[in-house]
Structures are given as C-alpha cells and as structure tokens.
Amino acid sequence: MKKYIERLWNGLLKENPVLVLMLGMCPALAVSTQAANGIGMGLSTLAVLVLSNFVISCLRKVIPDSVRLPCYIVIVASLVTVTELLIKAYLPSIYEALGIYIPLIVVNCIILGRAEAYANKHTPLLSVMDGIGMGLGFTIALTLAGMIRELLGAGTVFGLRLLPESFGMTIFIQPPGAFLVFALIIAVMNAIGIKTRQRQLVESGCDGNCALCSTACEERKAEAAADAKPASEQKGGDKA
Amino acid sequence: MKNTFRGGVHPAGHKELSRESRLRLFDPKGEMVFPLSQHIGKPAKPVVQKNDEVKVGQVLAEADGLISAPIHSSCSGTVKGIEKRRVIGGALADCIVINNDGQFTPFADYSKRQDANKLSNQEIIKRVQKAGVVGLGGAGFPACVKLQPKIPEAIEYVIANGAECEPYLTCNDQLMRIHSNEIVEGLELVLRLFPNAEGVICIEDNKPEAIEAMKRAASGKPRMSVRTMVTKYPQGGERSLIQAVAGVDFPTAQLPADVGCIVQNVGTLYAIQRAVLYGEPLFSQCFTITGEAVANPGNYIVRVGTSFAELLEEAGGLKDGAEMKKALAGGPMMGVALGTLDIPIQKQSNGLTILAEDPVEAAEELMTNCLRCGRCTTVCPLGLMPQLMCDAAVAGDLERFEKKLYGMDCIQCGSCTFACPAKRPLTPVFKQAKAEILENRKREGGGQK
Amino acid sequence: MNAAVNTVNLSSAPHARDKWTTPFIMRMVALSLLPATVVGIWVYGWNAFGIVALAIVSAVAAEWVFNKICHKPSTIWDGSAVVTGMLLALSLGPQTPLYCPVIGSVFAIVVCKGCFGGLGKNFINPALAARCFLLISFANAMAIKPVIDAVATATPVGAMKAGEVVNVTKMFLGTADGVIGSSILALLAGGLLLWCLDIIHGEICFSVLIGFTLFMGIFGGKGFDVNYLLAHLCGGGVVMGAFFMATDYVTSPVSKLGQFIYGCLIGVLGGLFRLKGNTADSFSYAIIIGNVCTPLIDTYIVQKPFAYRKVGKTRKASKEPFRIPKPVIALTLIAAIAGVALSGVFSVTKDKIEEQEVFKQSVAYREVCPEATSFSYDDKAQEILGDEGTETENATIYACYVGKNAQNDLVGYALSVGAKGFGGQVIMALGLTPEGKITGINFTELKETAGLGMRADEPEFKDQFPGKSVSVDLVKGAPQDDNDISAITGATVTSTAVHNAVNAGLNFYETVLKGGN
C-alpha cells in the first residue's frame, strides 16, 4: 500500500513533471494563462496519462525493445485522438478553451517519458498510480502558474476579480510571462528547500543518469529490489 | 603602419629615471653564486670542486649537449661548493658558490684583438659556443644554436634587437650609445654567417641618441641599416619584430629561422663581438637598477653571480621614506617578482626594478567580471583571443584552450592583462594553463614508453 | 638590509596596468548619455526628470538588494546599474507613469542581469529587455502621448507609418514628440564621443545604421529619397539603439567580422519590423534578436591568430554506415488495431462535431441577425462566392448566410466581410435586414492599434451603422448626411477598412441578394 501512496507523492512533489523533471513545458506554458484552463488541461492529460501508462504497462512484455518508442507513440496518439474526438463532440466549450493543445498531449513529453521510464518496467497498478501522481502534479503546477498569471495579468483568479482592471500586466498572459512565472516558482521551491529530486541529485553529487552509473546508491538499490522480485519469480532466480 | 606591428599597448615608460645614467662597471664584494641553469636547455655540468681556485673567465661548468651553454666565473676566488640556492622564480637550484676575493684576476688576456678576416665561419661559431653566449634579451637561448639554422642561405634578415620596449629598463639604450661600434662589429660577424641576409638594427623612437649613434656606426657598412620603430610594447618581442620588419607571422611550432629571420639582442651582439674578437667569455652584461623606490637609479655593467641585494646597495638603497612594495627581476611587464633580494643575477638578467606602489594590489580591488569589451583581443600582438582563452582555462577546458584557441602560442607578454579594464589576471591564468598542458604532454609521453 | 623585504608583494607578471577601469568605462557611457538626457528633460519637463531619476535610483537599489539577498559582495560601485537605469529612462515616453521605470529597472537588474550572474553575464540587453517587458505589460501606459504637439495623434514614426510627412529637423533636435531620449543631435554627440574614445566598436554602430538605411531604401517604397530615409533614421530609437544598445559589450560578438554581421542583421531586422510591424517600437525587438544570435555568430566566426590565417582549413569527411531499420510485426499489428479503433470512434462522433462547427460560426452571425434560428447558404450567392469568397477592389466578401426563423421565413442576411486595416485584416459579420438595411456589425477579427484602431469595437463607432443601406460615406468630424459615418480620430486606416468592407457587403446585397428568396 505504501508504495502506491509513494507514487502519488512522487508525482506531486518530489518528481513533479513540470517543476522538477521539466517535462511538458510546451503545454504548461501555453495553457496556464488562466487557472481554469490549467485544471482542464491537467485533468485531460491525467486521463490520457493513466490510460497510456496502464495500457503500456500491460503490454510491456509484448512490445519488442527495439521498436518500443514507435509503439508507445502509436498507442498514445490513438488514445489522445479518441479523447479529442470525444471532447469535441460532447464538451465543445472545453474544446474551445483548450483548442490545439489537446492533440499536443500526444507529444507531451510526460506521457512518453513516464511510459519509457516507469510504465514499461513496473506492474499496471503501480503504473496507474504513477500516472495519477504525475497527472496530479502536472495539474497542480499548471493551476498554480495559471492562478499567478491570471492574477498578475488580468487581476482575477478563476474569474473572481481580486485586483482592479487597470492593474493588469499583460506580459504575464503571454509566453514570456509564462517562462518568468515558472522560473519564479522553481526558484522559490529551491529556496525554501523542498526535497525535490533535483536537490537530492545536487546534494549527493550524481547527475541522475542511473542507466550509465555503476555506483550502488539508495535509489538504485530500491529500484533493483523492485525489479528483481518479479523477474526472479518468473525466470527462476536469474541474477541481473 | 610600416615600422610597427599589429596590436600592442603603451605602458608608461618611466625611462627618464635612469636613461641618462652612463654605464659603469660594478665590482661586487660578496660571494658570487652561479646557477647551473642560466639558459634554455640542459643545465651545465660543473668542472670545478670545492676549494678550487678560480679566476675571471675560467670555465666553471661545461655545456651538456647541443642545447646548452658553459658557465664562466665572473670573479676570482675559491670555490665554496656546489649548493642548493634560491634563484629567480623562487625555486632552489644547484649553484656553484664562489668566495669572492675582490681581486678579479683574469684567467687569460682578453684585451688582445683578433683579425676577423682570418677566422672562418666555423671558427666564429665555435668561439661563440665556447664563450657561453646566450640570448641576453631575457630568454637565454644559446646563441651558437641560433646561429646554426638548417639552411643559412635562406636567412633573409638578421635583426639586431635594440627596441628595449620593457618600461624602466635603459641599459640597452646606454649600450648602444657607448658601444655602437662593437655592436655593429658583432652584427658584421653574424652577417658573415648568412650571406643572403640583410642586417636591420631596430631601435624604438624614444631613444634618439642611440639611433644617432648606431646610424653613425653602421653608415657605410654593406647590408646594414637602422630602422626607427614606433615605441610600443612588445616591439622587442621576436615575433613582433619579425612582423614589423619582414611582415611575416609564424605559429608556435616554427622558429624564426624557419621564416628566414634571426633575431639577436644588441647586448648579445656585443657579447659575440667580445667572444669572437677578444676571446672573452660571457660573464658580465649591461643592467639597469631602477624604480621609484630606489635612491639612485642607474645603468651598470654587472657581473653574473652578483646578488640583487648588493646591486640595490650600490644604487644607494631605498629612497628615504619609500617602501619596497615590489622587487622585480626585469621590468614590470615581464619581470619576475622577487621574494627576497638574496638571489643571484643570471646571464639573462637585465634589470632590477623596485616599485614603491604595487599596481597589481590596486587592480585586485577593482576586479569585476569580464566585460567582454574585446580590448585584450585588440592589443594581442599575436592576434589571439585572450577573452575566450581565459574562459576556457578557468573552466578547465584545456582541450579548447590548446586546439581551438591556440593557447600554446601565447608569449606571455602581458599586453592583454595590462589593457583589461576589468583587471582580470589573464596572463597568470594562461601561464598556469600552459604549464598544465605541458605537464600532461610529459605524462602522456612518459606513459608511452 | 632585507628587513624591508617582508613587505614585498609576490604576484605574477605583468605588474603594470592601464588606467582604464570598469567604473571609468561606465562613467564615460553615462557622460555620453548626458546631453540627450538634459535635452529630453528640458524639452519634456519635470516628469521626464522624475522618470530618469527614478529609473537610476531603482536600478542601483535593485542591484544592492539583490546582491544582499544572494550574499554576494556589493557591485554597485562599478556603475553599470546607473547606465542601465539611464538607458531605460531615455527609451520611455515623457508621460509614462512613474511605476513603469521602477518596475522596468527592477526587472532589468534582477532578472536580466542578476539571475544570470551579474555584470558580463547577461544574454540580452537589460535596458531593452525591460523596455519590451514594459511595452507588453502596460501597453496603454507605455503608449507615447503627445506632449508638444497637442493636435498630433501619434509620434512621428506612427505618423510616418500612416503615410504622413514629418518635420525631420524637429526630430533631429529633439523638439518633436517621442521618448525622452529623442534628440538625435545630442545622441550623436555622445555616440561619436564613445566611438572616438574607442569605447564602442565602430563596426557595430555604423553597420546597424547602414544596414537599416539600405533596407529602408530598397524596400521602403520611396527609393533612396533623402528626406524619407533621414526621417526614419531620426525616429524610433534607431540612433540610440545603434550607438548605445547594440554596442553593449556583453551581448555583441567578439570578432570584427562577427560584429559587422551582427550590426547588419540588426539594421535589416529593424527595417523589416519598421515597415511591416504592428507598432512603432520596431528597433527594440531587432536588437534583442541580434543579442540572442550573438553566441551563434561567435561559435562560427572565430578569429584566428595572425600566424594561422593563411593556412587552409582541412575538412574531415566522416562516413557513417547507413542502417536500415528492421520492420517489426508487432509495430504493424499495433498500428492496425489503433487504426480500427480510431475509425470506429470517428464515425460515431462525426456528425455531432460538424453540428458544433456550424453552431460556433453561427454565434457571431446570431448577434447581428438576432431573429434567426438557423442559417443556411444561398445558392446564387454561393455560386459567386465559391469556397474562398470574392474580392472587390478594396475588400473581400468571405461568406454569405441566409437567416431563417423557426417558420422558415427569411429574417435577414449575415455576411462575413473584411478589408485590410493597419495591423492586418479587419473581418466582421455584417447583418442585413431582408430590405438591405444594416442591423449591426460584429468584429470577428480586429488587430489594430490599441487605443486607436481598436476603438472601432466600441459602441461609439459601431452604433453608427445600424439603419444605413445602399452605401456609406466616411467623413472626418461630425456626420452631415444620413449616410455618413464618422471616422475615428487618429485611426484613419482602420475606419477606411471598416467603411470599405461594409460598402462591399452592401453592394453585394444590391447586386446579388436583392429580390432573392
């Protein structure tokens, strides 16, 4: 049970896809003009992410290693197109608001990134939890940035007017402002010392590239233990 | 833009402190210390032992190999021993220490003049080699090696370097004024070795008396002329001279001889003349003791092995109320800072500058980040890009420093550091980087064996 | 004798330094900006002084505070913050509210300079970046309001873009409207001083000016007319940009050839933005783009030492083995399954989606034809319009819909018409009664100048149209006739565009729709 909750926390804070892993920046920057958009986009991505993680995790033994990326892309693209068609038909107002960014969920690096880094190595349920965690993290990051941008740019939050209309600094509604706001959020996170993966890496002095690393550190031991069990059960105690 | 080179800076000359002081001989009283390595190449091998009696001009150490030079005593007395003493640069090196008896008895008669016409080219070179003549401009390259390039007929220019671009120093100026005929004779001897070469005596335009004297001495001599160069640092560097005279630039892998030029300091030419025509080995050179903190700045003929401390005393010591903030062996642009004055002068030493204020200390207060203004690039006489070289060296990227930015070509003249408004220590960084690269090369070269 | 030796410093050669220092260079730049500042304050008054003072003080304070927060030694003594503040102030209008220079200076110092490592590490000119930040954030506040010429409607550059003639002498002296640092004479004096002192690189400032002049001459439409070129050179921050902004050491290339290319790039881009761009502030963006290109220029244009310049380059031809990826059955299978799933979902949702599309467009038309419950095509009109619409001499008719109510009676027409405005096409939905009277206009695309052309969307202008028919005439000032439409002051181009589009629609009605179903 604990490891499922751990996945949630991981996606929300420690490895927040936008603020720590710096994935999915394109839709994050473009869509976070309003807090409401952030929620809409975040939840759509969450849906796609959970589904894609689940499907890919189920198929992880079947997909050959050499063509795994094209396979992931086909799966993700189909899922996104299905989602897009459904939203276009039955929720036109959300479709208007999100516009081109729905098909852009396909190339959202979070989806492909989590498929490659997690879903193809772990069980479906864990992958689903990872998807939920990452999706929630994405949503929260977007909503937070959206709130700030909306407040500074238009004086409202979720449509509620908090500041006089003449105050608005238009730059925050536009892409340059998006970069500035995200940079500020990440800077504040670093300044107050939130234990993100980046901080961990910086403090322990490694560059995070576990694949090429030969040091036996805590992270890898845990991962190896998680991997070794099902593999050894299947192959009868093979040493990795 | 004829008589000058590209780049360069104009540091304050301060030459008025000592330029009118006539060269006079200084005979020291204290012990004389002769480092075994006073030249580029292998250190000399000692041929004397403790308690040996030596006289002025006697061989103390033999040359070891082709790129090496013998060392002769500049005093008479008894050999105290071969000890480790501190030399210029701060290292402890093997030195022959002689107890000076103050008599300066010569080893042979160095006043008898030979007829130059009776000497063959080989003889000339042999005498230069025996006399231990090295480049007296500061580098100390064995002169006989320089005089034997692969193809003597290909040499187009023999450049007599009378530029003396280093601030504060005026000994070459005086030498040219007083011994112009000897210098010209030395140049004539060298020109004999290179039948196709033209002799060009280059003097900066801040030395009008020297120019006059050399012009008079060289008038009527075939294949010889005097050129007045624009006063700019580092005009006296061999690459800058060759660029100004022959219009040629060459990379670090090549020697001046590869582009048809031989450059010799006027002091070296004087020593060559003494060595070839009088058989006198190199044991003294012209020298300037100067600086705002010195009581009586002046030019001297000093003997190799004298300690800097004695020289300062001879020049009247420190001025009243002046503090010795910096003691330099040489001038401010390329001189080496001395931690103590109990250090012997070497053959290539040509000055002692004592400063009452240290510009480097003041600069450290004013240091900022690199402005990327590009002044360093504008002044570099070799056309390097010190900005980028410093970035690479500080980042540890020696590969880029050496291969893409040609860092090993740097002659460490100090022009870039002088000109930098952000007061960044460019030249020290380059020295460090070059030393590291050479270390790595040695290590790799050793590993292959 | 050697007691004094213990006080000796030991350091590496060289032991001499030239007299130029960083504060000296900054002081000289500030000095060269002083004439323009003084003229600006004298011409524009005390508000300008307030802007200049505030900008400088905020910049210095921001740097001090930022250094404190980051636990770094204070760097305000090097004078670069003062220069940034002055440059920013000189590029603001004299009536700019005082919070603008403060916010701008803070942004310039903290974000553009401080966050990247301080002096010498910024990737973009801080003063210009701050100016662009302010332009985007506070578009209205930053719009230059005329101070001197009360009758004029825009700055000289704005007027030039609208095709009017300007007084070049006034711009040269600095007595025309514009930003605080408008006096070209004063700026030139300062700029040339800097060039003569060899503080700025002539390769940059002159190639910017030459690039700009050549581009304007070739593409400006007036050939190399001296008055035209001078007018453009004297306005819009060209001279200031060329001498003070583009020449910033940190953001310009290191090699001479690179500097020349950089200057030409800025000049050409500046000209392009001036001619085709939306606003009068073209040069700022051109310089910023140049700044961003500097690292690229520096990578490819490397100055070799003198000794290596004649040696030819060697190129290594590296051959990489050509691998053909192996086709995999699994990939084909997955793609096939996905294809089937997709086509299934598509066929289910197809009709619903089309319905939504039509409904979306109809919202605009609904507003101008309120009684209609559905819209459909008119065959005769469609024949003429085709798929893309038809163009008349100065407008385009994109589409025509017939509005019908629940009883299927004709209640009106909705046309989509457009014409070229100041900042692009002005497209609107034009509603007509069956008799051809205008019911109203509703803009679907309006990208005009804020505060001027955009006022076309206000009721004051839009409400003039309902009731008119056959054709409308555009007049300046109050309408005399029934068919007159009052133009928006200062937005001639936009007003003309709307007028042309409406007339095209009305004409279409007269020729095609009248007497139809």
Image (tube, rainbow, N blue to C red):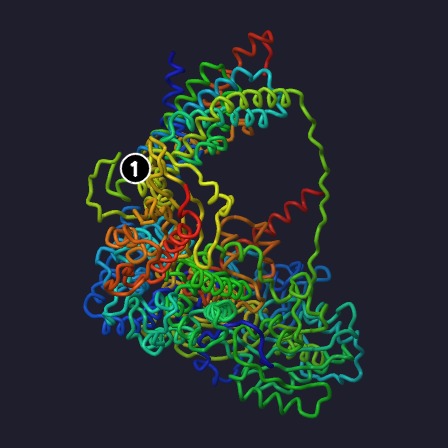
Which quarter of the figure is the C terminus of chain B placed in? top right
On screen, residue A98 above or below B308: above
Q: Give the quarter of the image for residue C56.
A: bottom left
Is the N terminus of chain B in the top left, top right, bottom left or bottom right quadrant? bottom right
Q: Does residue A123 appear in the picture of this structure?
A: yes
Mark 1 crowd level (few <14, some 14–19, many ≥20, 10 Å Cα):
some
Asked whether C267 or C186 is in front, the reply is C267
In which quarter of the view is residue C48 placed? bottom left
Q: Please provide percent x and percent y for residue B354.
A: 42, 70
Above-or-below relation of B11 to B409: below
Q: Is residue B87 left or right of residue C1?
A: right
Which amino acid type corresponds to the residue marked 1 in the rendered image?
A: Glu
Mark 1 belongs to chain: C
Occupied quadrant, residue B113: bottom right
- Give the camera-side residue of A199 and C10: A199
Taking the spot 48% from the left edge, 26% from the top edge, the residue there is: C350
**Number of numbered discs overlaid on the protein picture:** 1
**Eyeballing the image, is C189 above or below A214?**
below
Q: Is residue B333 visible?
A: no
Determine whether, in the image, residue A46 is placed left or right of residue B3: left
Q: Which residue is mark 1?
A: C371
Q: Describe the element under mark 1 as helix, strand or loop.
A: loop
Q: Nearer the viewer, residue B192 or A38?
A: A38
Residue C282: x %, y % from top left: 40, 61
**Front residue of this view, candidates A231 and B69:** A231
Query: What residue lies at 39% left-to-right and 76% top-to-bottom?
Result: C193
Q: Position of residue B258 (x, y in %)?
A: 72, 68
Q: Percent x, y for residue A118?
A: 49, 22
Residue farthest toward the front in the current orientation of the protein: C515
